[in-house]
Image (cartoon, rainbow, N blue to C red):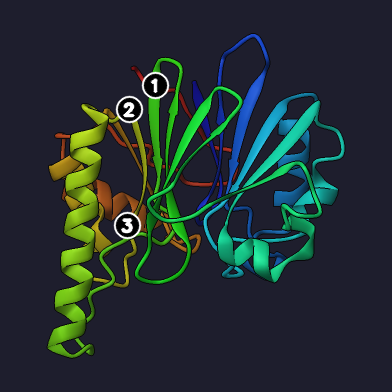
C-alpha cells in the first residue's frame, strides 16, 4: 500500500490489489483545503475503485463537493458517520445506495471491508478497518480532547474515553498496521497522538489534524522518536510506502 497526503486530515490510501482500490479520508470543504487539492484528488483517483470515508460533518473533515470530484472513478462507495447522513441529503443511505452509515460500536461490512465505528467525544466516529491482510485505524476526531480550560469532570471524561479507545485498539488489532491519528499541535499532549504511538504501537503512524502546519508534524516526529515509523509530510502530494 501507499499513502498520499492531501491536507489536514485528508489522505488517500492506495491498495495494490487487482481492483485498483483506494480509500479517500475526510476530504474537507473548500475553506479548509488548498486550491489545488481538488484537481490532485480527482487525478489520483481516476479509474479506481474508491471507498470515501467521512468521520463527521465538521467542515475541516467533510465536503459534499466530493461527489462531483469522483466522476472519473471506476466506482465509489461512501462510508459516513450518522451526523453526515442526517446533515447532507447527498449522503442519505435511504436515498443513495452507494452510502453506508457507521455508528459507534457498530461493525458493518462493505464488500471485503469490515468497518467498526468508535465514538468521538467531539463529533462522529473513528473507523477501524479490517481488510484482507491488514488493518487500518482512521481517528477522525477521536482524540484526547482534554483542555486546561475544561472543568475537572470534563477532563476526566475526555481522558477516560480516549484511554478506553486506546485499550480497544490495542486488544482487537493485535499489531495495528496503519494508524491515522490526531496529533493536534494546539494541545500539549498532541491530542493523544503520542499515546497512540506508545500504547497502540502501530507499524506505521500517520499524524494528522495539523491544519497545514507541516513544521508541527516534524516536532511531533521528534517527540515520538524512533519507536514508531512515521509518515512526516511537507506538502500536498507527498507519499509514503509503509514496510508492513
Q: Residue 177's mark?
A: 2
Q: Upstream in the sequence, badge 2 or badge 1?
A: 1
Looking at the rendered image, the quarter that the C terminus falls into is: top left
Does residue 138 appear in this view?
A: yes
Give me the C-alpha separation between circle 3 and circle 2: 18 Å
Residue at image x 24%, y 52%? 165
Q: Secondary structure at mark 1?
A: strand
Q: Residue 183's mark?
A: 3
Q: Please, which residue is most extreme toward the front here?
A: 94
Residue picked out by circle 1: 134
Does residue 201 appear in this view?
A: no
Q: Please, which residue is most extreme toward the top here?
A: 18
Q: Is residue 126 left or right of residue 58?
A: left
* Residue neighbourhood size for the residue with mark 2, other residues' Cα within 10 Å, grouped as few (<14), some (14–19), many (≥20): some
Q: Secondary structure at mark 2?
A: loop
The image shows residue 132 at horizontal and vertical percentages of 45, 16
Amino acid at each position: 500500500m501507499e499513502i498520499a497526503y492531501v491536507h489536514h486530515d485528508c489522505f488517500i490510501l492506495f491498495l495494490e490489489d487487482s481492483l485498483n482500490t483506494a480509500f479517500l479520508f475526510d476530504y474537507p470543504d473548500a475553506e479548509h483545503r488548498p486550491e489545488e487539492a481538488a484537481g490532485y484528488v480527482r487525478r489520483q483517483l481516476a479509474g479506481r475503485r474508491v471507498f470515501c470515508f467521512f468521520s463527521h460533518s465538521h467542515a475541516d473533515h467533510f465536503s459534499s463537493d466530493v461527489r462531483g470530484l469522483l466522476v472519473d472513478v471506476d466506482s465509489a462507495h461512501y462510508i459516513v458517520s450518522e451526523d453526515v447522513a442526517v446533515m447532507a441529503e447527498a449522503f442519505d443511505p435511504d436515498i443513495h445506495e452507494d452510502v453506508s452509515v457507521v455508528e459507534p460500536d457498530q461493525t458493518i461490512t462493505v464488500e471485503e471491508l469490515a468497518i467498526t465505528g468508535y465514538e468521538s467525544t467531539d463529533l462522529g466516529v473513528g473507523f477501524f478497518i479490517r481488510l484482507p491482510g491488514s488493518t487500518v485505524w482512521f481517528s477522525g476526531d477521536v482524540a484526547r480532547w482534554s483542555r486546561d480550560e475544561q472543568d475537572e469532570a470534563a477532563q476526566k471524561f475526555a481522558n477516560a474515553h480516549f484511554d478506553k479507545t486506546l485499550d480497544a485498539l490495542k486488544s482487537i488489532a493485535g499489531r495495528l498496521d496503519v494508524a491515522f491519528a490526531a496529533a493536534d499541535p494546539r494541545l500539549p499532549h498532541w491530542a493523544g497522538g503520542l499515546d497512540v504511538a506508545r500504547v497502540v504501537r502501530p507499524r506505521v503512524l500517520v499524524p494528522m489534524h495539523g491544519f497545514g502546519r507541516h513544521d508541527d508534524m516534524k516536532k511531533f516526529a521528534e517527540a515520538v522518536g524512533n519507536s514508531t515509523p512515521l509518515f512526516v509530510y511537507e506538502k500536498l502530494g507527498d507519499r509514503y510506502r509503509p514496510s508492513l
